[in-house]
Image: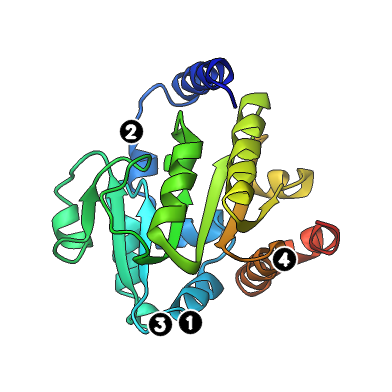
């Protein structure tokens, strides 16, 4: 994107965010719990296992963590006891004192993270920073900086209109240009009916210094384990990405 294109894109994204949310921090988003995270991102168990294969105590970063309810749920899940969970956000909430281990909430924008380079094994975003950012290319650049080799990002974004589609396209293009193996799953009408109404979203995976097939395999393994009923709907898309 050149400067004029980026300015136009940022304006349209901001206009869309205001129209969509009215309130920049609606409570229903801030308080999403672990179960909602796992549903909306098509499972995280295999994602966590993959990150754990990169380090005996992997660091997982939640971009746009809200009040950290999901992190509290993951921390209390014995299956994830070896994982170090961090959250990134622009606003402090009292809940951060109990939902996060001491020092594990980072007050910072996703476009310029206050995190050491090559220190994170996995990052997630559930309708978080990667949905609302006016500069998604900066987030991808930061992910490339903070993730270790073969580190992974998994995210859920809105896909309701042309603006959303453009944002998601930019994210995948930027991931690819930074050497990530990346894939985006676009839910079809069957899932939208199950989800209720016309709300649409996409789920993406990017693996630093990886291949697209590695990203597909990770997304597919989580989908198969956590949401078996959706696997039948999406199997053709995985076979023909």
- Label 1 and label 3: CA atoms lie apart by 14 Å
Instruction: Please name the residue shown 18% across and 43% down the image.
Output: 92
Give coordinates of residue 181: x percent, y percent: 64, 59
Instruction: Please name the residue shown 48% across and 82% down the image.
Output: 53
CA neighbours of label 4 inside 10 A, class few (<14), some (14 to 19), many (20+)? few
| The disc label shown at residue 79, or none | 3
| The disc label shown at residue 53, or none | 1
Residue under numbered circle 4: 229
CA neighbours of label 2 inside 10 A, class few (<14), some (14 to 19), many (20+)? few
Instruction: Please name the residue shown 76% across and 46% down the image.
Output: 188
Q: Earlier in the sequence, mark 3 or mark 4?
A: 3
Residue under numbered circle 2: 25
- Residue 135 lies left or right of residue 64; in this view the side is right
Kindly indicate the quadrant of the structure image that contains residue 123: bottom left
Q: Earlier in the sequence, mark 1 or mark 3?
A: 1
In the picture, the quarter occupied by the C terminus is bottom right
- Label 1 and label 4: CA atoms lie apart by 27 Å
- Label 1 and label 2: CA atoms lie apart by 35 Å
- Residue 236 lies left or right of residue 117; in this view the side is right
Instruction: Please name the residue shown 72% across and 65% down the image.
Output: 229
Element at label 2? loop
Are the residues tagged 1 and 4 within 8 Å (C-beta)?
no
């Amino acid at each position: 994107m050149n400067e004029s294109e980026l300015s136009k894109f940022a304006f349209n994204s901001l206009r869309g965010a205001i129209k969509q949310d009215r309130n920049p921090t609606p409570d229903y988003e801030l308080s999403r719990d672990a179960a909602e995270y796992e549903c909306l991102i098509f499972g995280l168990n295999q994602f966590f296992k993959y990150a754990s294969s990169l380090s005996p105590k992997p660091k997982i970063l939640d971009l746009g963590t809200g009040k950290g309810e999901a992190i509290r749920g993951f921390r209390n899940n014995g299956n994830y006891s070896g994982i170090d969970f961090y959250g990134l956000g622009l606003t402090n909430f009292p809940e951060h004192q109990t939902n996060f281990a001491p020092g594990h909430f980072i007050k910072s924008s996703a476009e310029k993270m206050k995190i050491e380079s090559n220190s994170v094994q996995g990052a997630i975003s559930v309708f978080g920073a990667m949905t609302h950012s006016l500069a998604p290319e900066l987030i991808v650049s930061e992910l490339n900086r903070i993730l270790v080799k073969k580190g992974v990002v998994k995210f859920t974004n809105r896909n309701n209109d042309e603006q959303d589609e453009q944002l998601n396209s930019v994210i995948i293009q930027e991931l690819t240009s930074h050497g990530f193996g990346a894939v985006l799953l676009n839910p079809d009408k069957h899932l939208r009916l199950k989800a209720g109404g016309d709300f649409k979203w996409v789920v993406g995976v990017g693996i630093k210094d990886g291949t697209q097939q590695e990203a597909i395999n990770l997304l597919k393994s989580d989908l198969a384990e956590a949401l078996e009923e959706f696997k039948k709907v999406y199997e053709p898309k995985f076979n023909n990405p």
